[in-house]
């Protein structure tokens, strides 16, 4: 008898519970939720300023989360985008070079789209692995940012606009936080309701099947990279406005923490599983952790150690990994070709 | 299809893993409160009652000098760099002596990180913020936020740009532009009126100290001794090995016979330059070489004549005065901005073994 | 003749290609370029530079190129094992190189050099095991695992060492090693060559090397064949860690100093050298000799740019363009080969 186990829950009353259970079993955000709860409890006990001064925590969340949200689109398709750090730097430098702020913003965003398209070109048309293609772009664009800016920060012509940008707009929320919220909502809707967005999952899950099902995979990949590029450019603009000057060395931290947020959030690097919600939860956990540790006076070195450990444990407690441990342990100790549940 | 039972088992394993992580976090926080007693972290939210309503005047409601003050220090370096490592102990010691409870954050020369740290600092409502700008052009938002919250700001090591200075109460530290100037003045002196072609080794690209020193040196050369010409410049990344390679390659590019001198933005790099020269059988004593710092690496080179001049920078002066100045602002009445420049003492072979310029880092 | 596996595990899914085993009759220029390209281009670059760039061919400059190449090269040669095992790269070499350099100099100053080396060895083994277990046993993504170990490793190093810069004894063994040259060859270069030869031997003539390649090319088949695959992965990361350890020693010897920031950029630069050398990031094939060539190419290029007066920004652009170009040729060659 081949009843699918997840549905075999006995009588009809359990159906609802059964469906809820199935939904939860499919979700990847479980770990992020647990981490967020742990971190929040820690913060409540040791450093409640994290919550009383919530605008600071939100600001940090927006910082980490924006690029992470754009990155999620790319990772869901099974690709990687390492160039976001340099896109951030280049877009900031370009925008600051314009006297007219809005023109600068428009040009920078366009550049982000173009770079995203270039990345996609290399991945789809030329056929390079996205890790390498975006790694090369990471170097290339970083160099370009230095060349354009002549290796020093580029100060904005319209400083007042920039300074106002950093002030709260609605209630306690600064434009940066609001933009992040909008980006998150937009991405969530796109990935869950819009057909094109939902196809990202198919492209990531099984590219061949997606192609056979008639999904224009190439176009989707282009869209994904362009989204990531656009968002990274937006992040660069925001950072520059917040700081009133563009720094060609910016973005290094953004790359690492964005990946960390997405990974902790449960996204699968092979693609096909994950969600922006998970990324949001991951980013929130990291933000609370970082802000809490800073309020608490934890030295930067120790902060890095802790973040590293959190990331380490997050990535080895991936459901895939847990299953893999069984198989690997068996292989390790008995060297037998036992069926590996992770295959 | 996943078996819900195994899923639950996996999730509970995941939870255990995370609890372990959580336990580590608890443990780290616990132990952290024990070490570095002078860096007393605020476990509960710091007292809210000491944020004065005024925007400019220093907080003098804690009139008694014996009171302790909560101070946030936003630094761009610390134990990750040699200067920072020797800046911190005198800073912390003096602060403890004066009753300042320090909360030190290191942003690693990342302007964005420092801005974020600043937001945290302002929200913590300390009595004062000590700022060492990571990127001078990017700190105005931080200053404005502190001002709006009524928290006085003092600046250490790298001063603000002129238009931002009014937002702060004090500055203490070296004059990084002036250091470049001093080094150049020595160079001009040694060059006499001769035409000299030189190499320039700068600090890390994008770093404000590097930019200021380069500007100070170059402006002075152009004004005071245009007979000295910068033939090529490269970055040494504040590293000895990078500057050794860069210097060697510049020598190849420019031609050893055309080089009359070298300027390096700090002593660590000038040591690399000296090694590069020696490896190519060029006697450093025959060239005019100046740098900045008078450090453990640099001072012996000055004594031996290989480096002709350097500028003394005392990390302990810097650290101590950061604390002293902060205390002055907290307890005194300062209507005018306090500015304390660390003397840019030129060090040549003559005064290199003078104890007043003894190397500290 | 090995048939390339069509099961791509853990990376960008590519269309299954049943024809890849069929050799093209016609001469595929792109294919040839991608295989032999690095040899030809390196030779061309060196010749071009020798003729057109003043001073490139001088003994002093060759020494500079070698001094540039040696530390990165040793690290890259070790990391090649990780790349061949289809695990992308090891980001933690940044922390490892700095740690081994600091241990060598600091411990030599306070105790003795051998103790410093022994501790370095111990640290390398720890890194190798931690990274290897996470990637091999837990099947976690190597990029993230090594990212997290870098955070932890650098944090620990700075915390423990206080971030100070350590100076070696100016007359000590380390300093002498760093400044000794045989003709245009710094001793460090000889170390690089020896390490490359040793690693090459391991990769091509030992079972372990064979298993690394086999695992990289087809994980499942290797495991089904009864191989202790987690051990293979741990081994690959440990080899990489040894490379990083030696690289750190050589770097420390060159300047006779050690500081936690001295290894910045080593991770991606080493990877760039490996890629330019022609080793596929998909894993399964590659050679350390190619990596050596890739390192020479990248170092020579950087050297040429400095000699020509191009600053940091242009250098980064060149390396980036190079990476993309090198891999593009390879990818296009495979596409043309199929059509």
Image (spheres, helix red, strand yellow):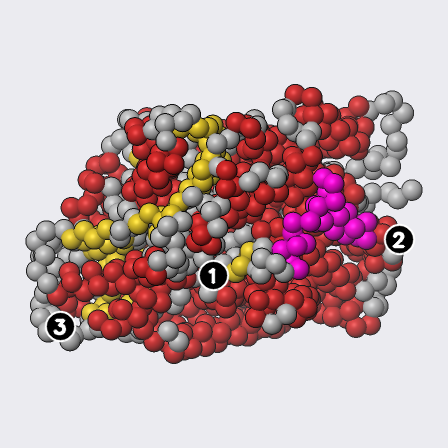
Pick whichever of labels 1 and 2 is earlier in the sequence.
Answer: 1
Above or below, B177 against A332 in this view is above
Rendered residue at 31%/65% (across/down): B91
Q: Do we see residue B67 in this rendering?
A: yes
- Mark 2: secondary structure: helix
Residue C205 numbered tag: 2
Total labels drawn: 3
- Mark 1: secondary structure: loop
- Residue interval drawn in magenta: C173-199
Rendered residue at 40%/45% (across/down): B309
Rendered residue at 54%/38% (across/down): B247
Which residue lies under the disc numbered 3? B65
Membership of C188 in magenta stretch: yes
Nearest the camera: B322 or A343?
B322
Which residue lies under the disc numbered 1? C164
Q: Residues within 10 Å of mark 1 (few under 14, many from 20)?
A: many
Quadrant containing the N terminus of chain C is top right
Membership of B48 in magenta stretch: no
Furthest-front residue in view?
Answer: B350
Tag 1, which chain?
Answer: C
Left-right relation of A73 to C219: left
């Amino acid at each position: 008898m081949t009843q699918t186990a997840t549905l075999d829950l006995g009588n009809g009353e359990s159906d609802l519970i059964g469906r809820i259970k199935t939904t939860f079993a499919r979700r990847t955000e479980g770990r992020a939720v647990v981490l967020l709860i742990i971190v929040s409890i820690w913060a409540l006990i040791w450093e409640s300023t994290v919550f009383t001064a919530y605008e600071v925590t939100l600001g940090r969340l927006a910082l980490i989360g924006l690029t992470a949200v754009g990155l999620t689109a790319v990772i869901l398709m099974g690709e990687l985008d390492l160039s976001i750090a340099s896109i951030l730097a280049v877009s900031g430098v370009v925008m600051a070079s314009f006297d007219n702020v809005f023109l600068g913003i428009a040009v920078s965003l366009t550049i982000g789209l173009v770079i995203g398209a270039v990345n996609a070109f290399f991945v789809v048309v030329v056929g390079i692995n996205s890790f390498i293609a975006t790694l090369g772009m990471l170097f290339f664009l970083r160099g370009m940012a230095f060349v354009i800016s002549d290796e020093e920060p580029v100060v904005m012509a319209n400083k007042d606009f920039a300074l106002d940008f950093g002030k709260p707009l609605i209630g306690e929320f600064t434009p940066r936080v609001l933009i992040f919220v909008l980006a998150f909502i937009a991405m969530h809707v796109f990935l869950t309701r819009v057909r094109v967005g939902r196809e990202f999952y198919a492209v990531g899950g099984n590219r061949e099947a997606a192609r056979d099902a008639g999904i224009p995979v190439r176009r989707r990949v282009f869209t994904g990279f362009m989204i990531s590029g656009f968002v990274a450019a937006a992040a660069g603009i925001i950072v520059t406005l917040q700081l009133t000057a563009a720094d060609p060395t910016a973005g290094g931290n953004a790359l690492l923490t964005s990946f960390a947020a997405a990974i902790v959030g449960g996204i699968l690097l092979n693609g096909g599983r994950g969600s922006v919600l998970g990324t949001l939860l991951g980013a929130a956990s990291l933000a609370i952790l970082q802000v809490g540790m800073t309020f608490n006076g934890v030295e930067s070195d120790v902060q890095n150690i802790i973040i590293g450990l959190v990331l380490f444990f997050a990535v080895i407690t991936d459901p895939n990994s847990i299953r893999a441990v069984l198989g690997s342990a068996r292989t390790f100790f008995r060297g037998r070709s036992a069926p590996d549940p992770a295959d | 299809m996943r078996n819900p039972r195994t899923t639950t088992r996996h999730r509970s394993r995941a939870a255990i893993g995370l609890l372990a992580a959580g336990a580590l976090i608890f443990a780290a926080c616990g132990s952290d409160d024990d070490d570095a007693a002078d860096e007393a972290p605020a476990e509960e939210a710091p007292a809210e009652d000491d944020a004065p309503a005024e925007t400019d005047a220093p907080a003098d409601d804690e009139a008694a000098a014996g009171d302790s003050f909560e101070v946030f220090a936003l630094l761009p370096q610390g134990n990750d760099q040699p200067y920072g490592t020797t800046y911190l102990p005198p800073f912390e010691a003096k602060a403890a002596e004066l009753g300042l409870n320090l909360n030190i954050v290191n942003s690693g020369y990342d302007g964005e990180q420092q801005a974020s740290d600043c937001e945290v600092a302002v929200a913590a409502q300390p009595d004062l913020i000590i700022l060492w700008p990571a990127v001078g052009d990017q700190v105005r938002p931080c200053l404005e936020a502190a001002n709006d919250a009524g928290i006085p700001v003092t600046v250490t090591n790298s001063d603000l740009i002129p238009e931002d200075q009014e937002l702060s109460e004090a500055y203490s530290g070296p004059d990084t532009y002036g250091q470049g100037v001093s080094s150049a003045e020595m160079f001009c002196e040694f060059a006499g009126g001769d035409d000299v072609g030189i190499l320039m080794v700068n600090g890390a690209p994008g770093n404000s100290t590097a930019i200021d020193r380069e500007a100070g040196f170059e402006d002075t050369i152009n004004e005071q001794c245009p007979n000295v010409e910068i033939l090529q410049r490269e970055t040494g990344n504040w590293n000895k090995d990078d500057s050794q390679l860069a210097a060697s390659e510049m020598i190849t590019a420019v031609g050893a016979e055309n080089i009359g001198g070298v300027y390096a933005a700090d002593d660590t790099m000038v040591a690399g330059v000296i090694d590069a020269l020696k490896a190519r059988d060029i006697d450093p004593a025959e060239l005019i070489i100046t740098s900045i710092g008078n450090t453990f690496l640099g001072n012996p080179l000055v004594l031996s004549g290989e480096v002709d001049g350097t500028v003394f920078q005392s990390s302990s002066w810097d650290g101590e005065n950061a604390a002293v100045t902060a205390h002055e602002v907290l307890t005194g009445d300062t209507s005018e901005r306090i500015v304390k420049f660390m003397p840019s003492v030129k060090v040549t072979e003559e005064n290199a073994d003078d104890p007043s310029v003894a190397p500290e880092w | 003749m090995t048939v390339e596996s069509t099961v791509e595990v853990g990376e960008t899914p590519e269309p299954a290609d049943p024809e890849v085993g069929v050799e093209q009759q016609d001469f595929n220029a792109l294919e040839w370029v991608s295989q032999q390209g690095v040899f030809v281009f390196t030779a061309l670059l060196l010749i071009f530079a020798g003729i057109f760039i003043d001073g490139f061919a001088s003994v002093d400059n060759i020494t500079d190129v070698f001094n540039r190449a040696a530390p990165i090269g040793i690290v890259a040669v070790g990391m090649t094992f990780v790349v061949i095992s289809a695990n992308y790269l090891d980001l933690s070499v940044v922390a490892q190189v700095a740690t081994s350099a600091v241990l060598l100099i600091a411990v030599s100053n306070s105790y003795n050099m051998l103790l410093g080396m022994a501790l370095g060895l111990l640290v390398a083994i720890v890194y190798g095991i931690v990274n290897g277990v996470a990637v091999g046993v837990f099947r976690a993504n190597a990029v993230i695992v090594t990212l997290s170990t870098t955070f932890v490793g650098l944090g620990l190093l700075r915390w423990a060492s206080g971030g100070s810069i350590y100076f070696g004894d100016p007359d000590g063994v380390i300093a002498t090693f760093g400044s000794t040259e045989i003709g245009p060859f710094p001793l460090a270069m000889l170390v690089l060559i020896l390490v490359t030869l040793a690693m090459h031997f391991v990769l091509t003539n030992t079972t372990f090397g064979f298993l690394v390649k086999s695992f990289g090319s087809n994980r499942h088949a290797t495991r089904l064949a009864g191989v202790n695959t987690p051990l293979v992965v741990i081994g690959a990361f440990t080899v990489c860690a040894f490379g990083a350890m030696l690289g750190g020693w050589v770097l420390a010897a060159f300047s006779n100093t050690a500081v936690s920031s001295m290894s910045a950029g080593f991770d991606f630069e080493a990877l760039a050298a490996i890629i330019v050398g022609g080793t596929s990031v998909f894993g399964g094939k590659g050679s350390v000799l190619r990596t050596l060539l890739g390192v020479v190419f990248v170092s020579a290029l950087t050297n040429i740019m400095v000699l020509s007066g191009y600053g940091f920004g242009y250098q980064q652009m060149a390396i980036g363009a190079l990476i993309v170009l090198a891999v593009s040729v390879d990818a296009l060659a495979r596409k043309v080969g199929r059509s």
